[in-house]
Amino acid sequence: MIVVAILAGGMSSRFLAGDKLLYPVRGKPLIRYVVDSLMMCRYVSKVIAISSQSNINSINEHVETVQDPFQIGPLGALYLALRMFSEVFVVGGDMPFINCACLYTILEKCGFDGTISACMPQCNDYLEPLLSLYRRSMIGIIEYGIANRILSLQKLIKIFRVSIKTINICNSSELKTCLTNVNSVEDVHYRLHQILL
């Protein structure tokens, strides 16, 4: 069983119609598609959202929500999640194509090797920090990053040569689709209409 943390603290700066996570799609906010999909997965014991102060009251109507006091992006949210749980699977609140099959595929490929600190998708040299599994052994590295304003997980992993397992997704259209996020109103109309509208 796994805890899933939905990162819901972004500023939606490229989304010109307000907070993208609360943007209505067929009568419900975008984040509800993510929450509802994850809550159906049998290996998920708990789903939480880590939210900014500005939208915590709106998001917590849909899922248990924890306020992110750091407001420095995904790194701060991940740090908060790992202080609460020894192992956490992280997804973006703006990833409406997430489904149980993608979650199970990642977890199966990650395995249960206790020596790794993280397990994440990778295509070519690019690591995908979302749709990834993290363990509490990452906390010291994240604390260093926060203290030294190195807020990129990719940089921290390279600096510390963190023991991670990668999953090649270059040829997996299913996992690439699950990683698709929404950044604009156009994304809602052109990317989402195929499965949501």
Image (tube, rainbow, N blue to C red):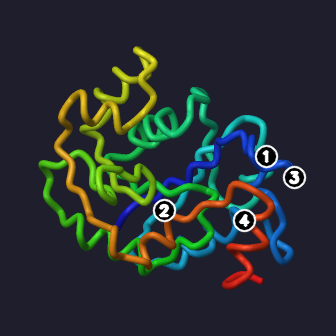
Q: Name the residue beneath numbered marker 3.
A: 17
Q: Name the residue beneath numbered marker 2.
A: 46
At which x and y percent is residue 125? 29, 50
Q: Give the CA distance from mark 3 to mark 4.
A: 12 Å
Count of labels in the image? 4
Residue 133 quadrant: bottom left
Name the side, left or right, on which 151 lies relative to 7.
left
Name the side, left or right, on which 46 lies relative to 18.
left
Nearer the camera: disc 4 or disc 2: 4
Query: For the residue labelled by badge 2, is the local secondary structure a helix, a strand or a loop?
Result: strand
Q: Name the residue beneath numbered marker 4.
A: 187
Which disc, if any, is residue 57?
1
What's the residue at 75%, 68% (across, down)? 188
* Kind of residue at badge 1: Asn
Nearer the camera: disc 4 or disc 1: 4
Q: Give the CA distance from mark 2 to mark 3.
A: 30 Å
Asked if labels 3 and 1 touch by Cβ distance under 8 angstroms, the answer is no
Q: Give the CA distance from mark 1 to mark 3.
A: 19 Å
At which x and y percent is residue 92? 56, 55
